[in-house]
Structures are given as C-alpha cells and as structure tokens.
Image: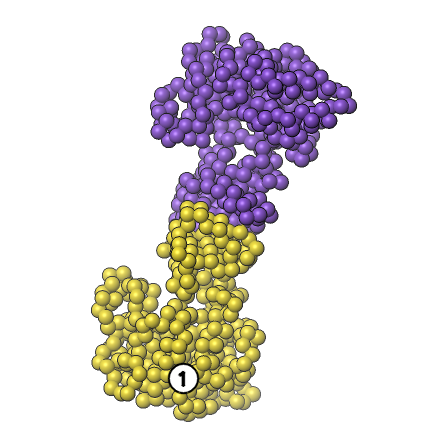
Chain colours: A yellow, B purple
Amino acid sequence: MTEHTYAVIMAGGGGTRLWPISRKESPKQLLPLLGKETMFQSTVARLERIFPPERILVVTVEEQARVMREQVPSIPKENYLIEPAPRGTASVVALAAAVLKRRDPQAVMAIQTADHHIRNQDLFQYLLRTAIDVAEKEYLVTLGITPTFPSTGYGYIQQGEPLNGDYKYPVYMVKRFKEKPDEATAQQLLRSGDHSWNSGMFVWRVDAILSEIQKQMPDLFKAVDEISSVWDSPDKIDVVKKIWYGLQTQTIDYGIMERAERVAVLPAGGLGWSDVGAWDSLFDVLLPDMNGNVSVNAQHLPLDTHNALVYSVDDQRLVVTIGMDDVVIVDAGDVLLVCKTDQSQKVKNIVEHLKKHNQEKYL
Amino acid sequence: MTEHTYAVIMAGGGGTRLWPISRKESPKQLLPLLGKETMFQSTVARLERIFPPERILVVTVEEQARVMREQVPSIPKENYLIEPAPRGTASVVALAAAVLKRRDPQAVMAIQTADHHIRNQDLFQYLLRTAIDVAEKEYLVTLGITPTFPSTGYGYIQQGEPLNGDYKYPVYMVKRFKEKPDEATAQQLLRSGDHSWNSGMFVWRVDAILSEIQKQMPDLFKAVDEISSVWDSPDKIDVVKKIWYGLQTQTIDYGIMERAERVAVLPAGGLGWSDVGAWDSLFDVLLPDMNGNVSVNAQHLPLDTHNALVYSVDDQRLVVTIGMDDVVIVDAGDVLLVCKTDQSQKVKNIVEHLKKHNQEKYL
C-alpha cells in the first residue's frame, strides 16, 4: 500500500427501494438505516481502516454533499466532486479518474458505493489490499461476490483462468460480464461455480481506466479531460455545468467493463456484502432472533410471529404482531408499510403510483 | 306498544377485545368504532325509533355515565342508574327492574347492550315489537340470533314448541340454554336447526323477572328491593354503595335464565347482528370492497392485498400493504397491531401480558 492509493465513494443516488424510510430528500446513504451510523458514515469508517481521509474522495450532488460534510467532517472539502446532475457511474468514474490523475498521475483508485453494507470488515480490508496489488499491475479489478442464491437482481461476472502472481487471495481473469439474468439463467449461473455477482466495487490505476474510457467512450474522455484542465481555475463550476448536462447517462459496466481488456476478478465469499437493495435484505444484514424476527429501533411485541422485520422511526410506539410470518413492517411516521417479505421489491410500484398521482409529500 | 314499555341499556363493560382502540379509559361503547357515531349513540338511536328518550334507561358506572350524558343529552339524567362497581348482568337487570317497578308497576323492559351492532334496523324494530307483545303475556323473552357459522364464542338457546298466538314472527318456547360449546358441539348445534345464539337481548315485564329473581336469587332480590325503597330518598347513594359491594357477581343467563320457566325465544335471522367482539367481526359489520378489504378512517393503498382490515385513528397517515391476505392492521397512535385475522382473539393475550408487566400506558 503506497501513498498513491485512493478511495472514491459514489454517493449520488436517490434510491427508493427502501421507501418509505429512504425518501427523495433523505436517501438511504444519509440515514442511520442499520444502527447509529449513517450508511455513508459506515462506508467511510470502513475505508478509513485502509485510506487516510485525505485520500478518500466523494462524488455526489450538491444537496447531499452538504449533509455528508456534516456527517463526516474528516474528509477535506476539496475531496468532494460535485455532479451538477446524475449521469450514471461511467461519468462518475471518468470524472474521479481525471481529477485524481491531475493530482497524482500514479494514482490507484478503489470505487465504493455509499449505501452498501459489509459485515466482515477485516476480510474486506485484506481483499481490497490484494485488489490494489493486482490493479498496480494495470489490471482493471472487480470485487465479485460469491452468489448464495440465484439472484435476478444483480449482474454476473464469469471468471476465466487464474491470474499468476503472488496474491493472498485467488484472482481470475474475467471471461464475461452478464446483465441481470432471468430466473432459469440465474439458477444455471449459481450452479456453474465460476460466476460472481457484480458488486460495483472496482479497483484500477487512473491511467488504465482513462485509457479504456478514451478507447470506448471518447466523448466522455474528452469531457472529463476538459473539466480536469480547468479544475483549479475559477472557471471550474461553469465549465463542469456546461459539459455535464451534455453527457449521456451510462453505467461503467455497460459503457466500459463489458468490452474492456485486462479485467480481473476477486471472487469474495464470506464478506457479508449486501447492497441493501430491498427490505428483505435486512434479514441478511442484521441478526434475527431465534424466531427469525428482526427489529430496528422498534418496540416489537411478537406473538406466534416468525421472520418478521419491524422497522420504526419511533421507538415509543408499541408494535404488536399476532400470527404473522414472513412480513416486513416499516413505520416511517407519515407512512406505514406492511409487506410480505418476498414481495418487498414491489415497493417501487408503490413509489411509481404515488409519483403518478402527485403524492409528493410521501416520496 | 303502550307507554309502559322501556328500554334498558347495559353499558358498564370495559372490553379489551378490540384493543388497542378500546382502552381502559375509553371502552368500545364510547368510541365511534364504525363511523361517526359512538356505539352508545347508535344503540340509543336504534332504540329511539321505538322508545321516547324518557323511557330509555342506562345502567353503567359513574365515569362512563359522565361521557354518555355528553354524547346523548336527550336521555334524562335520572334515567342513568349508577353501579358503584360492575357485579354482572344479573345485578344490572335486578336493579333496573326494581327501580322501574317503583316508577311503573306494569313496566315491560327490553334489555340491550351498548356495544353491539345491528345492521337491519327496520327488522330489529319489528322483532322487538313482537317480543314486547309476547312479554306482555308474562313470558321472559329472549332475542336469539340464527347462527351463520359454528361459533364457540356464544352461548346457544335451544327452541322447543312454537308459541301459540297472533304474532308477526315465529316465537318458540325455550327448551334449554347452553353455555359456549366446543368446536365439535358447535358444529352439531349449527346443523340441528333448532338452536340460536344468545344475543343478550331480553324483553320481560318487570314483575315477571323480579318474581324469577326472588325465586332463584333471593339475596339479590332483597338487595334491590332495599335499594328501590330508598331510591327517592337522600340515603340512596350510601345505601346503594353499601349493598352493591356485598353482591356476588353473576350473569343473568347463568343466574336466572337457565332455570327460569315460561321462557320464549324469537330466532332472528337477517338482523345483521354482531357483538363486535373481536377485530375479525368488522368484516361482517362493514362492507368490504371487491378484494375483501375494509378500511376505517384510514388512507389505505393496497397492492396484491385481500381481506385486509385497516383501522386507523389518523387519516393523514398512509397505510401501504403489499402481498398481504387475511390481516388486521390497527393503528391506534401509540400502538400498532398487525394480526392474522383468524387469530384476532389473541389480542386478549397481549392485553394480559401488558397488564402483567405493568405497561399501564398501553392499556
């Protein structure tokens, strides 16, 4: 680990999959979803075991940056890169790489998401150090997650030959990226044994990723090159705005990774990783009691109740459940959600419905 | 119908079966459980179609009487008979009969409960008029309810021979009263075709019931005789208190009806009667939508939801349900209940648990 390693936290999203707790004005990464710390604070704390705060960058939108600076005063103000508007992860990565290259041409950057959860922090630290070692050899490295069920909610990465080198964890060349599969394909991929979930965690040298961007998305390369050239001038804000709104929204996976060369994967098992992408994921992230029940900030009195998640913003309120199995109960104050656990993805349908009918106050 | 007919509303109970809405300080009869009127107001409105308010009496405890007088100013203050403490329905009936006899020796009284619901009010009016006709012939008349399912929650009344007379509805002599049966017996009673549920609605001449009380519960007879002798004197309150606390708690069914002679029953079908004894009964009392969902005072947004009751004290709160079937959701502000419909009787176990652990604030 050299002083040329940096972490870049992507934190622009306004996820509604954990509605009604995650809201437009307070997206999940800014909330103490799983305990006392907000997810952004936990992400920074996890990274601070490896990177000093001066080498942690955050890419986000202005409104969120204000809250984040309050939540984590340790990260220097100039390390916040402000997107005038979300334009997808390809743009975020390109901007961060261009700005970092200007600051440190030898920089290696580890991309993290602000709203994921990792239970096994020690293992994470070791894996990331190995990923950095591999990235220094000019590989684009992805942290894959060993699948535990046939998920249709993640993209998959197929591994090829093992990578030669004196690494502490197995590393493979990537054979193929695959988009979110259907149920049958997911079953197949799980059984294959050579597929990982795409966690969205990447590590690479900034010059390596920028050269891929130049090759595959030349317009984006030109845009961030122009931005980085005025980064320390008074024109910065105007130039960023002008250029940014003209960018096409694109993900790094689809825009770059699927066709990139020299891509490696570290398949991580036992990391306890979750993108906390729906209410049912909290059963994996938190420890249920012997009846399978989980409660967060709630006074829950269960009778004949199993596998119930009770999540509340008001710990004075008593939540009684009788004869309930496999249910998620979320008390957000102005909204109460009662949902069969295996249907918690349908929260997005409710959010769409409320949007369509201009129920802004509930969004 | 003569000016000798009276209604007596029994309203002393502090039911907890509709907890967390029905509470110690505000029992269900004092609440607008099913709409804008409280159940007590609905009961009075139903009776005022037959009896002028001057001939409607209420037996209750002091704290509840205060609220009832505010809710129904039409009933004269002196028509409230105050129990110093609940001593069962036998004592209530005996007191009302003794006081009424003093006022009107030819009185016929119709006993009603303050917290039952009757949908078909026209039919109720006709049935009650017939019951009064029968009672004037010195029968003790019970209004039976034709069973619609094998309930184990009610006592049953077996009918015998039809009663001769020019009545608008069929009337039978009562063969036997039966206590709440077990499941198998209830199935049998339902199939028999000659059993009704005991609704707790009775009609009789005061002299007829007092003579039965004198025969079967002489101590109670003596007690209410003594009370009625001082009813208009300044000693009344002291005497009532002294005597009342010495009474044994007993129901009219067990104490009198089971062994009484000349008991008749009017089996009522189609009355839409409910004792609203548990949350699941609201599905019978209120009209569900095409998905079987019922909501009371709630903003309910259901997705893939069937047979859900959503009851709220706060109509500003949005209640979203996804993939929920056969569930009762009751939002009482400080308590939220989520309960499988067929287990709503278990609410009493929760109430007992809270009592045991001194959680008075939730009772």
In the image, residue A247 above or below residue A26: below
In the image, residue A39 above or below residue B275: below
The subunit carrying tag 1 is A
Task: Name the spot of residue A290 as percent of width and height, x first.
Answer: 39, 56
Count of numbered badges drawn on the protein: 1
The amino acid at mark 1 is: Met
Q: Which of A174 and A128 lies nearest the eye of the viewer?
A: A128
In the image, residue B258 above or below residue A52: above
Quickly name the residue at label 1: A109
Residue found farthest to the bottom: A105
Task: Name the spot of residue A264 as percent of width and height, x first.
Answer: 29, 81
At x 52% / y 55%, what residue is drawn? A299
Visible residue check, residue B201: no
Residue found farthest to the right: B234
User: Residue A267 falls in which quadrant of the image?
Assistant: bottom left
Task: Name the spot of residue A245 as percent of width and height, x first.
Answer: 47, 76
Quadrant location of the N terminus of chain A in the rendered image: bottom left
Task: Name the spot of residue B135 as percent of width and height, x first.
Answer: 55, 13
At x 34% / y 83%, what residue is drawn? A130
The answer to whether B172 appears left or right of B82 in the picture is left
The answer to whether A155 appears left or right of B24 in the picture is left
At x 41% / y 62%, what residue is drawn? A287
Q: Secondary structure at mark 1?
A: strand
| Label 1 CA crowd tier, 10 Å (few <14, some 14–19, many 20+) | many
The answer to whether B256 appears left or right of A168 in the picture is right
Visible residue check, residue B253: yes
User: Residue A208 falls in which quadrant of the image?
Assistant: bottom left
At x 61% / y 36%, what residue is drawn? B30
